[in-house]
């Protein structure tokens, strides 16, 4: 505010001029005079001086005084009117011819001073309660001026002011059209970019009032007031889900139909005025706001269904086929129909059945495609037709199949042009733009449909008389490889081929069946060119080559996965290949197409990419890069998995063997226990035998004949001996059977039984035989013990080796797991870097848009200062704004 110091005076300021003295005197009179007439005259004079070379003086000295008058003298209509008029002049954005030395933003500066006192805005709102024309209208205009200069700050003040927005809405009910029309302009500025205010305005019955004014003013034939109403309606609906829901639930969609009455629109043979065209454009924009692709599918679907049920879609389709419609209105109508049918099956089927009023009748789709491939039609109209065709095929499997069917030989009909014929004629047209349009249209017929891609391989084309037909796939490659086609031709065909080959091994196999295709791609990618457009072409060729690797069926010996990777490595280089892929997403045209589904292009030369293609490219770019350039890492991963699997299998086998050995050891322990029991039984028998010998010896020495007890003992001894023999025989048989399983035996042979020389011959013979048999059994057991001990030692040695080998394998497995974890961390790091780069790209785009707005603002200021500024970039901005 240093600019105002020379007008405010003071120690550091210059002496005030004569004009400043005059303003000072008037301000003093307006502030101190006791007579109302004197104050009124002073304010009237200040108003006359506020416009012109004394504008700054009035603003710097009188603004606070004028505000006080609005508050204290509001009972006097005339003085309030003069004060409001003076404030409007001071804060106006416009400069008079004699205001040469005044800054262009002087109105913004005074507005900032005025709104620093928040009660000032509330004071102006309170003045709206005054019905008198000389007060209400200037108050409305002053609030409008404040909103023009400082929109966000003033919007917030009005939002928090008691009954602020409702008071402004009541102005639409004013019977004086001038006040009502000014109120419309105020509400347009008030609702622009402020969601909460938009909601309040909508709930204040704004839709009803707006549509009533539109109908009372004559609909599309109305004047500028109709356009203002529609701009306000568009502000309320655009990107405001709550207001859109209120509009649909209030059944206002049905009332929009009266605006598109074709008979009323075409009744006037004189032609369409510029205002009528503007009105139609705004109404179509309002319809598009309800079904914008930026909304979720669920939100759009509700509005789309209502538009079909209310007959609005039918009226739009009728308008689409009507004659005498201006090109720009027809273009916007096509875009509107496109978004009404986008992704909605019922609406898409309705559009498929629309017939053009021709002789014979033809489907509307065919008529529109005729316009698209006709290079005589306006560029924006052709773009709109392509967008409509894309929306018709969006998530429409039936529509895609029907279009593909018109390309197949069996569907050809005599004397009837089909959509397929038009697309093929456009695809191989001499006009590069027609080729691009047709290629993108075909791209959408196969997008996400494997069956359609395979059916399209059946299409045969007759290129010349007497020449055999060629497939559509090969003809596209022939056009690319012949000479140097236009950039749009290259990009269109490459986008179509990439979409065709993606996720389809069958089409990829057919593509690789011609060796020249791979040769063309490698030559294009390996060629060094610094031109940005050629780098984009090389990037798409690299992408197409990557699809040949990714979707390879390994049925082509010459071009299998390994051979294609070797070709890329030797002829191109992996680093160069990765650089070529990245060039596509760096393109400005790619970024512009990726933002919005509908086509945005300043001119035909800037139309290079399709929105759906950018989504496909983004989803597959990293995957293809890894498929082509990460061969070693992938094979290492495969080898790691194979080694780990082998180690796991070996460990499993060893664990099984160890379990078997443990079972055998348990069985041997049980058998050793049984052996101990048998030895104990043998010892008992030996003890009994010794007792018998002692008894026999006593009998021989002291008696002549055996007594009854002795006989019983002899009989018992013989029976026990026989039983012992039987038991020993059974045990020997058992030992023979278990010999192969015993590995550990802990049996100590019992001591030899004592011999007796005094035994009888029979008993001595029996004892000798028993001792002999016992000795043989002991020798056999000892031999078996030695053998089993040797086997046990060998088994323990083998088990020790297996445990050592197992430990080594486990160590290797852990090492491989650590290495795999490290590789996973590297991959996560790379993915994080890619995400950061994407975020940086988005931030750069946002910064670019912000800088563009600042440049536009600075240019406006330069124009205000009388500087000459080139309008070329402004015109481009206007085109972008219209597209939005």
Image (spheres, rainbow, N blue to C red):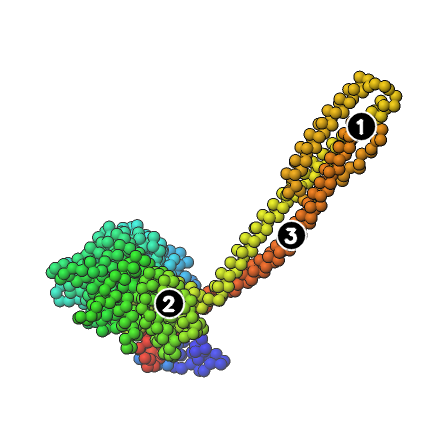
Of the image marks 3 and 1, the number of the one nearer the N terminus: 1
Circle 3 sits on which residue?
Answer: 798
Percent of width and height locating residue 62? 40, 72
Of the image marks 2 and 1, the number of the one nearer the N terminus: 2
Q: CA distance from mark 2 to mark 1?
A: 102 Å
Q: What is the secondary structure assignment of the residue under circle 3?
A: helix
Percent of width and height locating residue 122? 40, 61
Q: Are marks 2 and 1 in contact (CB under 8 Å)?
A: no
Q: Residue at x 65, y 49 (%)?
A: 795
Q: Residue at x 43, y 77 (%)?
A: 4
Residue 222, label in figure: none
Number of disc labels: 3
Of the image marks 3 and 2, the number of the one nearer the N terminus: 2
For discs 3 and 2, the disc positioned in front in the rendered view: 3
In the picture as drawn, the residue positioned furthest to the front comes out as 761
Classify 10 Å Cα crowding around label 1: few (below 14), some (14-19), many (20 and above).
few
Circle 1 sits on which residue?
Answer: 761
Classify 10 Å Cα crowding around label 3: few (below 14), some (14-19), many (20 and above).
few
Front-most of residues 327 and 860: 327
For discs 3 and 1, the disc positioned in front in the rendered view: 1
Up-down relation of residue 658 to residue 329 (above or below): above
Res 77 → quadrant: bottom left
Q: What is the secondary structure assignment of the residue under circle 1?
A: helix
Q: CA distance from mark 3 to mark 2?
A: 51 Å
Percent of width and height locating residue 714? 78, 22
Up-down relation of residue 663 to residue 762 (above or below): below
Res 86 → quadrant: bottom left
Circle 2 sits on which residue?
Answer: 559
Q: What is the secondary structure assignment of the residue under circle 2?
A: loop
């Amino acid at each position: 505010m240093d600019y105002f110091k020379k007008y405010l005076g003071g120690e550091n300021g210059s002496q005030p001029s004569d004009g400043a003295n005059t303003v000072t005197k008037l301000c003093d009179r307006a502030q101190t005079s006791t007579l109302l007439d004197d104050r009124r005259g002073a304010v009237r004079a200040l108003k006359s001086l506020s416009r012109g070379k004394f504008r700054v003086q009035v603003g710097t000295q009188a603004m606070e005084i004028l505000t006080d008058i609005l508050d204290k003298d509001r009972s006097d209509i005339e003085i309030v009117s003069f004060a409001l008029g003076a404030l409007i002049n001071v804060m106006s954005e416009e400069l008079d011819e004699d205001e040469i030395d005044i800054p262009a933003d002087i109105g913004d500066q005074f507005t900032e001073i005025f709104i620093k006192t928040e009660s000032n805005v509330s004071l102006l709102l309170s003045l709206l309660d005054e019905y008198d024309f000389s007060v209400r209208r200037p108050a409305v205009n002053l609030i409008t001026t404040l909103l023009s200069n400082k929109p966000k700050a003033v919007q917030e003040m009005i939002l928090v002011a008691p009954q602020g927005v409702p008071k402004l809405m009541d102005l639409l009910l004013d019977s004086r059209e001038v006040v009502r029309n000014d109120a419309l302009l105020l509400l347009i500025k008030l609702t622009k970019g402020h969601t909460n205010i938009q909601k309040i305005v909508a709930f204040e019955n704004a839709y009803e009032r707006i549509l009533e004014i539109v109908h009372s003013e004559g609909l599309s034939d109305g004047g500028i007031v109709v356009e203002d109403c529609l701009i306000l309606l568009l502000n309320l609906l655009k990107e405001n889900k709550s207001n859109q829901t209120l509009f649909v639930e209030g059944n206002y969609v049905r009332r929009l139909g009266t605006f598109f009455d074709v008979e009323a629109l075409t009744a006037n043979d004189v032609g369409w005025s510029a205002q009528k065209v503007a009105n139609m454009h705004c109404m179509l924009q309002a319809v598009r706001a309800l079904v914008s692709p930026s909304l979720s599918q669920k939100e759009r679907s509700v509005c789309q269904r209502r538009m079909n049920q209310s007959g609005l879609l039918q009226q739009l389709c009728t308008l689409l086929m009507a004659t005498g419609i201006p090109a720009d209105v027809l273009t916007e109508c096509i875009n509107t129909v496109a978004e009404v049918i986008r992704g909605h099956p019922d609406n898409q089927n309705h559009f498929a059945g629309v017939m053009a009023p021709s002789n014979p009748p033809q489907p509307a789709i065919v008529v529109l495609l005729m316009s698209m491939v006709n290079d005589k039609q306006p560029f924006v109209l052709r773009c709109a037709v392509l967008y409509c065709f894309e929306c018709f095929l969006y998530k429409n499997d039936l529509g895609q199949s029907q279009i593909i069917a018109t390309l197949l030989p069996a569907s050809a009909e005599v004397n009837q042009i089909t959509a397929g014929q038009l697309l093929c004629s456009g695809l191989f047209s001499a006009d590069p733009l027609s080729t691009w349009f047709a290629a993108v249209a075909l791209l959408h017929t196969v997008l996400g449909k494997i069956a359609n891609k395979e059916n399209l391989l059946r299409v045969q084309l007759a290129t010349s008389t007497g020449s055999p037909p060629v497939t559509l796939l090969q003809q596209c490659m022939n056009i690319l490889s012949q000479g140097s086609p236009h950039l749009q031709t290259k990009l269109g065909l490459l986008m179509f081929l990439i979409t065709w080959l993606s996720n389809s091994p069958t089409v990829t196999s057919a593509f690789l069946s011609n060796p020249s295709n791979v040769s063309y791609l490698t030559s294009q990618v390996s060629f060094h060119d610094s031109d940005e457009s050629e780098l984009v072409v090389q990037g798409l060729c690299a992408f197409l080559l990557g699809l040949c690797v990714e979707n390879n069926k390994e049925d082509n010996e010459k071009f299998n996965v390994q051979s294609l990777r070797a070709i890329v490595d030797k002829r191109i280089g992996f680093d160069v290949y990765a650089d070529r892929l990245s060039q596509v997403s760096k393109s400005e045209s790619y970024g512009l197409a990726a933002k919005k589904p509908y086509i945005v292009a300043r001119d035909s030369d800037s139309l290079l990419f399709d929105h759906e293609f950018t989504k496909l490219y983004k989803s597959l770019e990293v995957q293809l890069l890894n498929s082509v350039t990460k061969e070693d890492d992938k094979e290492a991963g495969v080898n790691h998995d194979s080694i780990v699997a082998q180690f796991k299998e070996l460990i499993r086998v060893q664990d099984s063997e160890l379990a078997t050995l443990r079972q055998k050891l348990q069985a041997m322990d049980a058998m050793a226990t049984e052996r101990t029991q048998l030895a104990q039984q043998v010892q008992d028998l030996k003890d009994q035998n010794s007792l018998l010998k002692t008894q026999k010896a006593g009998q021989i020495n002291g008696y002549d004949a055996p007594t009854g007890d002795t006989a019983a003992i002899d009989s018992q001894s013989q029976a026990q001996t026989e039983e012992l023999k039987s038991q020993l025989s059974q045990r020997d048989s058992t030992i023979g059977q278990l010999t192969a399983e015993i590995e550990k035996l802990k049996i100590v042979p019992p001591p030899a039984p004592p011999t007796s020389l005094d035994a009888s011959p029979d008993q001595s013979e029996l004892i000798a035989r028993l001792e002999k048999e016992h000795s043989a059994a002991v020798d056999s057991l000892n031999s078996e013990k030695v053998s089993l001990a040797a086997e046990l030692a060998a088994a323990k040695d083998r088990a020790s080796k297996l445990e050592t080998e197992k430990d080594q394998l486990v160590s290797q497995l852990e090492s491989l797991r650590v290495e795999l974890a490290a590789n996973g961390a590297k991959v996560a790091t790379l993915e994080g870097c890619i995400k950061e780069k994407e975020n940086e790209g988005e931030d750069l785009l946002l910064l670019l848009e912000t800088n563009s707005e600042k440049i536009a603002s600075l240019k406006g200021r330069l124009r205000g200062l009388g500087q000459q500024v080139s309008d070329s970039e402004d015109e481009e901005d206007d085109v972008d704004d219209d597209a939005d």
